[in-house]
Amino acid sequence: MMLADLLHNCAACLSEGVLALTIIAVLIADMLLPFNTSRGVCTVLGVFGACAALLALAYAPPVTDPAAPEMFFSGVFISDRLSLIFKIIFYLGAIFTLLFSERSSELSRYRFGEYSALVLGAVLSASFLASANNFVLFLLAFETLSLCCYVLAAYDKHARLPGEAALKYLLYGAVASSIMLFGLSYIYGLTQTLSIDRSMVSLAEQAVLGTGTLVVYLSMLLVLTGIGFKIAMFPFHFWCPDVYQGAPTPVAAFLSVVSKAAGFAALLRLAAPVISAPQLAAYTSPVDRLQAMHLLFGLAACITMTYGNLAALRQTNAKRLLAYSSIAHAGYLLLGLAVFRSDAVEAMLAYLIIYTLMNLGAFWVVILLVRETGSSEIDSFAGAAFKSPLLFAVLFLCLISLTGLPPTAGFAAKFLLFKSVIAAGIDAMGGGARISLNAAYYFALALAGVLNSAVSLFYYMKFARKMVFEKQPNLQFACTRLEAMYALALGLPLLLLLDFDPLLDLVSGVLNPVLPTMLTLLK
Amino acid sequence: MKDFLQLMGSTTATPVGLEAYLIVAAALFVLGLTACIARRNAIGILIGIELMLNAAVLNFMAFWRFQGSPLDGPAALAGPVMGIFIIVLAACEAAVALAVLLNLYFNFGTVEVDMVHEMKE
């Protein structure tokens, strides 16, 4: 009985177990093999492990009722659609980061085993974070992820810029997470439990009922500091450009995808119980409850995306440009939390999947450009479009997808997100013809998102224009067939997912039928 | 054991209340944050971070000691568990931070954060 129970619980975190074993295997392989062979072997082992973890997700007990997600290990570990989708994002991020790193010139001097172990360790903790339903696991996963990322940023240890990047990342990050921890201690005091779902619902009840309001909001703000740092939200974004520029480019790609998605996983883990709590709806109308939350996230979203886009306009370094672009995308994603409804969360998840693909694609071409030209300044990429039209096509596709223009998945993702904001505005009107203040707020948010997308077109196209219309002699830019395959693997889905019905299905419908099929095939 | 607990003030009529612990923790937190903002030496900033972490530990322990953790079960050791894990994390963080700083010292010859700024807008 006990054993069966334990096995049932362990099955829920099978993919994490696979990752943990992979980390050990990679470290042992690196120890036994000489420098040159260990590089390839560690990459293959790491990628294989991440793929196996992706498949192992199919063995997780299927989610039957999204309203009552399954709990494991006495309610510490939670398995639901939210965690499943985030884990898919993390594992994809790990696979591509490892493949990119092996091809990058910036990491070629160092042994690869520890690097792979750190990447996989970060992904392992991110995946625990996505499943955490207890503040102890939440904290451990959050901090382990941060520690792995600090070391990764400093991995090129003989160069000066990575050292500076790691210093800034580490000091700001450690301060932000201590502030978050202090906020968590107040939340524990206010709600008397470490279980996230009970704690957050109780906290929201206190906010709605107005008991102990100041401390309630203070503790929420303190926690938001730590998470806001991870996702590069406006007042806590300043580390982002420096770290992306200084860190090795594959690490920057990893941070912009996995670390940011992990921040959103943490945020949604805390927000999801409140969004789906039936008892909270009873207090006031659905639109009016937790008005401070709507206002806070709406403002943060607007400022973050506007700041990111405006600052990106005058960047001359490709890595800095992508850093500001990733700040802007955190802003778009926060729009979903400003709405604070389950349909907006679905839109956020869809956006995150697409963002992962298009951002990794853009970073991949930049990694190759940095390898071939030895610089990350956009000026040094002039004329690269004609040297390798295929890579340029993929970069161009990723850039217009990041902008959110129609023939790409980026458009579908932005459309879904803005649609959920406008839908909230229409609901706020309550069927009447008069536009209430609440409705106007949502319409303004959607408008801000659309205007910001228009602004972002300028800098993305400036980047692409430089590569096409300017020439420079002696430019070397070529890639192997394998490297072109990576680019296509990231670029093609952006075209295939352009219709948003499949995109929605991917998030809400397809996962449910596909996973059991995979499960039966595997068995 | 009972005498020991009484000596430690474990009865309901404790001479020192929850507020006292919270005030000390808040003061510790503010001191740590001030150190992080005011200090220019990276080691000084790390010490500030440790102070803030300890403030959080003190809060967790005080809340657990005075309120318990009834929703997690009558015997839940929420406060001590959280406290121990925070201490573990603080140690890990210090190890990683010192490694990064040591490497920074090799490259820049200083750990003053103002002297390390090669990346410009």
Image: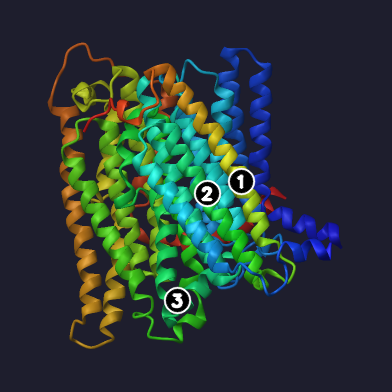
- Using a 10 Å C-alpha cutoff, classify the residue at mark 1 as few (fewer than 14 neighbours), some (14 to 19) or many (20 or more): some
Separation (CA) of disc 2 from disc 1? 8 Å
Q: Residue at x 30, y 57 (%)?
A: A414
Q: Residue at x 85, y 60 (%)?
A: A2
Separation (CA) of disc 2 from disc 3? 24 Å
Q: Tell me the SS state at disc 2.
A: helix
- Using a 10 Å C-alpha cutoff, classify the residue at mark 2 as few (fewer than 14 neighbours), some (14 to 19) or many (20 or more): many
Tell me, for residue B87, which label it has, or none: 1
The answer to whether A508 is drawn above or below residue A465 in the figure is below
Q: Position of residue A174 (x, y in %)?
A: 46, 43
Please give left or right for residue A193 compared with residue B1 in the image: left
The answer to which image quadrant residue A144 occupies is top right
Front-most of B83 and A85? Answer: B83
Q: Is there CB contact under 8 Å for labels 2 and 1?
A: yes
* Residue type, numbered disc 1: Ile
Front-most of A79 and B81? Answer: B81
The chain identifier of the residue carrying mark 1 reads: B
- Using a 10 Å C-alpha cutoff, classify the residue at mark 3 as few (fewer than 14 neighbours), some (14 to 19) or many (20 or more): few
Residue A156 in view here = no
* Residue type, numbered disc 2: Leu
Q: Position of residue B4 (x, y in %)?
A: 79, 61
The chain identifier of the residue carrying mark 3 reads: A
Tell me, for residue B53, which label it has, or none: 2
Which residue is disc 3 drawn over?
A: A212
